[in-house]
Amino acid sequence: MAIFRIYMLLCYLIPLQILQLLSKAFPSYFRDLYVTSMRKFNLVTRLVQLYKPYVLFKGIFDDTNSERLRGKAREMSSSNDEVDLFNFDPKCIDWKDYLINIHIPGVKKFVIKK
């Protein structure tokens, strides 16, 4: 995260500060560019803060116990209807569909409020 902050400072924040000075000196030329660029910078910064716990998470997920439980439920059940009713197999999730149609619209609606 420290390297990312240094990168953002050198590549974006310092140029934005120069652009801010230019926009004060020549508002008709640089004001709109500065406002738009600053808005984008703030959005990226918010998204980085939002996703930091997930991107930098060092844990390992293990579903071995869930798989055993699902196997036992199939063995014990006389019909698969009940097992299918409570299906919690993460392999069945269409992650691309989830991200595009649920997660990203939710982030836009509830996190990135305009």
Image (tube, rainbow, N blue to C red):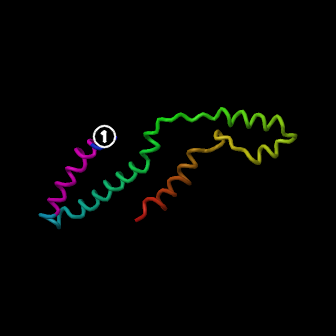
Looking at the image, which residue is at 53% across and 34% down?
60
Along the line of sight, the residue nearer the viewer: 49 or 98: 49
Magenta-span inclusion, residue 7: yes
**Local crowd size for mark 1, using a 10 Å CA cut-off: few (<14), some (14–19), many (≥20):** few
Q: Name the residue under label 1.
A: 2
- Judged by its main secondary structure, the magenta piece is helix
Q: Where is residue 33 in the image (x, y as percent from the top left)?
A: 24, 60
Looking at the image, which residue is at 79% across and 38% down?
73
Badge count: 1
From this viewpoint, which residue is outermost toward the left?
A: 25
The N terminus - image quarter: top left
Q: Where is residue 84 in the image (x, y as percent from the top left)?
A: 77, 45
Looking at the image, which residue is at 65% across and 32% down?
64
Looking at the image, which residue is at 17% across and 67% down?
28
Up-down: is 62 above or below 13?
above
Up-down: is 65 above or below 32?
above
Q: What stretch is highlighted in magenta?
A: 6-23
Q: Where is residue 53 in the image (x, y as percent from the top left)?
A: 45, 44
Q: Quadrant of residue 19?
A: bottom left
As drawn, is 74 to the left or to the right of 49? right
Along the line of sight, the residue nearer the viewer: 66 or 26: 66
From this viewpoint, which residue is outermost toward the right?
A: 78
Three-letter code for the amino acid on which mark 1 is drawn = Ala
The secondary element bearing badge 1 is classed as: helix
Q: Where is residue 105 in the image (x, y as percent from the top left)?
A: 51, 57
Magenta-span inclusion, residue 104: no
